[in-house]
Image (cartoon, rainbow, N blue to C red):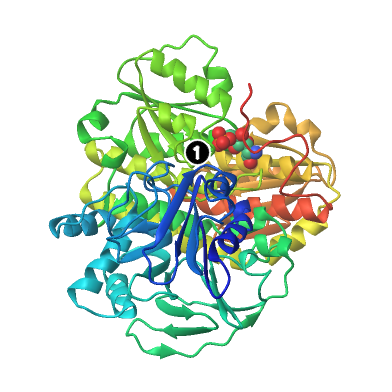
Amino acid sequence: MCGIVGYTGNRQAAPILLDGLARLEYRGYDSAGLAVRDGDASVRVVKTKGRLRLLAEKTDDGRTLVGTVGIGHTRWATHGEPSELNAHPHVSGNIMDNGVTTDDSEVVGVHNGIIENFAELKTKLISNKYTFYSETDTEVAIKMVDYYYKKYKVGPIDALSKTMVRMRGSYALAVMFKDYPGEIYVARKDAPLIVGVTEGEGFVASDVPALLKYTRQVYYIDNLEMARIVPGEVTFYDLNGDTVKKESTTITWDVEAAEKGGYEHFMIKEIHEQPRALMDTFNSLVKEQKIDLTGAGLDDETIRGIERIHIVACGSAWHVGMASQYVIEDIANIPVRTELASEFRYRKLLLKPSDLVIIISQSGETADSLEALREAKAMGIRTLAIVNVVGSSIAREADNVIYTIAGPEIAVATTKAYSTQLLTMYLLTVQFAFVRGVIDEEQYQYYLSEIKTIPSKVERILENKERLQWFAAKFSAEKDAFFIGRGLDYAICLEGSLKMKEISYIHSEAYAAGELKHGTISLIEPGTLVIGVLTQKHLMEKTVSNLAECKSRGAYLMGLTSNGNYSLEDTADFTFYVPRVDEHFMGSLTVIPLQLMGYYLSISRGLDADKPRNLAKSVTVE
Ligand code: M6R
């Protein structure tokens, strides 16, 4: 997600910070900022919305920010739109109009991650006379550190550890204190943070590429640890403030590999980021065992008034809609129609004022989805956007917005955005069902607890990926593949088939299993690969029969199902099992092996999985 850099030493900090941030640019960001301190003078903070180039221009390539210690940040918005005020660093005092701050700030800091209980902490700080200038959870964290620092008159490490005990969520924090010039303090939970030390210098970064120019010896800060960095030296602490001994690790990757966290492609990195992205998205919408959609402006009265839902999207986002329609109709009893945005925008729309139009989009900029949104709005229909990029056109124009917390997605083939969109739709469904009285408290808690297990189950599937790698290598010369399933499984087949074709260029089709004998089965030849997805108990036998029909015409069968649900082994040539979750949510698990298979097929054919031919990440033309 966001990028953090820090420097303390004998050189001017700002140019080094700008250079470090440039090396983290590939992660995506919407604003950036620096805080630099010159001896014990007040810290100066400069921030900009937009590209790093603007920050470099504003500071004359760092030359106007004099000082040998500083921190920098590139922000990917989660709380609050992309803007100069919301950009990091944040200060504990007040920020001045010219964007250059401030003489009453004890603490200045940058943060990656999400503070889940920021609203509660903010209320506490406001009652203690703190004022806020931004909408960010980061400003809350920095002011919390300041609060403990002053209240207990403790040192930076104690102030940080007291804050860590109060904060829920994930964070990598880099902080400077007015009383400790030349020093940087860092703290970490569930967000990466590394430290490098050279003769007379100290470096901090959220990711290896920012440090490679200076050192290959890095220290990884572990969860709930802190560190104090001074020129040429670093000390690590645990939550009790006791020092921790740590060995450095030698980085052997080149810059390109480092950007991908050691993975060969962004796509496989992003596939592995899914457990975290799913958990972050869950935590952004569920507070104290309750789904909270008030941030999206969906109050109970609005939810009760909805008579029909139209889900409108393109590509994989449309596949999310296809899967969600089964879930919504089954759990919440609301009729749903899922449509391609490019079709929706040109047909006669028979929408009613009590309808809800949900637009799903990772980028928030897809031209057809944006126009479909505008069509619905022009008819006075309520629109809800489910979007990953904060402040994007669809997010700005929709009546209501829910953000997925997938972080920047760089690979053209979506993986973590798809997964977080699907999880968001589950939560929306369960909340709609509960508010409308379709499910009771017990069912509500059951569904919530099932959804909460998805991230760790995805993790388990990822641990088993070698079998799929082997399978993909075996089929890398395949020309055609067919994905079949019924109901929800069919919707997942659509996504599995797209993942395969868009990056491996193997022709593939997804069919509702019962449709095969209406034409497609004539394409099955000896050796044709047919992949069956089977997770819905009441449909399994039927899909197994359809698979058997393909086998009797010579097809090679792969079965994808859940542990202990059903044995496909007699029929399929190769079976892959995923863990179990409530059947409505099985798609979140079965899609993972299909993503992996698409990826491994692509690399076993020697293709660039991140940049498939003819495709763009964001399709801003019709
Ligand atoms: O940014 P969006 O979610 O609106 O993009 C929609 C599609 O263009 C996108 O899902 C596309 O199909 C991907 N290449 C799928 O991997």
Residue positioned 26% across, 40% down in the render: 294
Residue marked by disc 1: 323
Could you tell me which secondary element the residue under label 1 belongs to? Answer: helix
Residue 282 screen position, x and y as percent: 38, 53
Number of residues whose C-alpha sits closer than 10 Å to that of mark 1, classed few (under 14), some (14–19) or many (20 or more): many
Q: How many marks?
A: 1
Q: Could you say which is closer to the camera, residue 66 or residue 568?
A: 66
Residue 220 screen position, x and y as percent: 54, 77
**Image quadrant of residue 305?**
top left
596 left or right, relative to 373: right
- Outermost residue on the top side: it is 348
- Whereabouts is ligand 1, in terms of quadrant? top right
Q: In the rendered view, would you say 348 is above or below 34? A: above
Q: Could you say which is closer to the camera, residue 591 or residue 610?
A: 610
Ligand 1 contact, mark 1 (Cβ < 8 Å): no
Residue 202 screen position, x and y as percent: 54, 76
Q: Is residue 449 visible?
A: no
Q: In the rendered view, would you say 330 is above or below 27? A: above
Q: Could you say which is closer to the camera, residue 100 or residue 393?
A: 100
Q: Is residue 348 visible?
A: yes
287 left or right, relative to 1: left
- Outermost residue on the left side: it is 127
Looking at numbered disc 1 in the image, what kind of residue is underneath it?
Ala
Residue positioned 21% across, 38% down in the render: 437
Residue 42 screen position, x and y as percent: 36, 63
Task: Quarter of the image for the C terminus: give it.
Answer: top right
Q: Could you say which is closer to the camera, residue 235 or residue 386?
A: 235
Residue positioned 52% across, 60% down in the render: 458
